[in-house]
Image (cartoon, rainbow, N blue to C red):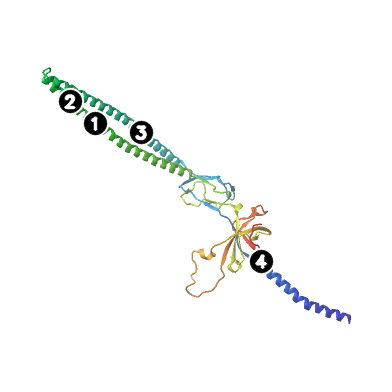
Amino acid sequence: MAMSLTKRKLKIVLALGAPLALCGLLGAYRMEAAGVQRTDDAYVAADYTVLAPRVAGQVSALLVDDNEEVHAGQLLARIDDRDYAAAADAARADVAVAQAAVAGADAALAQQQSVIAQAQAALSAARAARVFARADYERYADLARHGAGSTQNAQQARARIDTASAEVERQAAALQAARQQVNLLQAQREHAAAALARAHAALESAVLSLSWTRIVAPVDGTVGQRSVRVGAYVTPGTPLLAVVPLKQAYVVANFQETQLAGVRAGQRADVRVDTFPDTVLRGAVDSVAPATGVTFAALAPDNATGNFTKVVQRLPVKIRLDPGQPGLEQLRVGMSVEATLRTDDTGGAR
């Protein structure tokens, strides 16, 4: 009888406790679902750089191996630079010729100033001679009027005035021509200066092309996708290798649009990498993409024609990983991850 009573009490406890336990589990699940968003449509990404030459030529040296860590500014490869070095030397010679032309034009201008000074002096002398000739004529004419001198002397003095006046006009014309020559020399000097500027520009271009024969790392990172070999002929734009900045890796998680109502920049995130399932990396939401992934597709769907089937869209969410965590050095671009966002976080950095 006691045993039957105990079983009856146990059944009552189970009957009352099971619904309560179920309600508690459902409540906990809803609370978690309300504050957490997860997706396994996520991967590791990094802003890697594919290096390509800007000049054509034969690869003369390849100084890095696959998967080698490199630093910004490190020389990775060289293109045969002999043609470009010769072009730079020729450009330097052209600059020297242009500089000599400018110097010659400056010297000609300086010399022309001396010519102008000489012409001014000659004109002054001619004017003085004319003044003297006029005075001489007046003296001889006065003597002739008073019978103290001959008419011939007066006539000769008059002729000397005419000669002196002609000399003044000739020297004035010479001075004007000398001054006009300055304008011509200045124009020639400007032409020489323009040629010098053009030569300098050609030299800068040649030196720049020569520098482009050196392929250097733009950032710290790891070499990947090395497709070039020594001796290969490459043209501008030919992919040589990639430099992947693994230390700046981040996560791109594609969440359904229905999951993003509470997502804000700065909210904390947990990341589990499929390769290392026991490692949890911490991070924070950096930003949400401005459009769904399909928006930027090469062939975007046209929902205005044909039958329409509604498909839940996904938007990429960028997650920055906290620096200094164990396991970051093992990340590789393209690894699959599972991202969990804590949308109950206010978004402040912690």
The answer to whether residue 291 is above or below residue 73 is below
Q: How many marks?
A: 4
Q: Nearer the viewer, residue 177 or 103?
A: 177
Amino acid marked by disc 3: Asp
Q: Which residue is mark 2?
A: 161
List x then y, in percent, for residue 262: 62, 66
The answer to whether residue 145 is above or below residue 230 is above
N-term-proximal mark, 1 vs 3: 3
Q: Which residue is mark 1?
A: 172
N-term-proximal mark, 2 vs 3: 3
Mark 1, mark 3: which one is toward the viewer? 1
List x then y, in percent, for residue 338: 64, 62
User: Visible in this render: residue 273?
Assistant: no
In the rendered image, the residue lying farthest to the front is 146
What kind of element bears circle 3?
A: helix
Task: Look at 68% across and 67% down and name the residue there.
Answer: 32
Question: For the residues marked 2 and 3, what is the alpha-carbon distance in whole angstroms?
Answer: 40 Å
Q: Nearer the viewer, residue 148 or 271?
A: 148
In the rendered image, the residue lying farthest to the right is 1
Question: For the residues marked 3 and 4, what is the alpha-carbon distance in whole angstroms?
Answer: 81 Å
Q: Which residue is mark 4?
A: 35
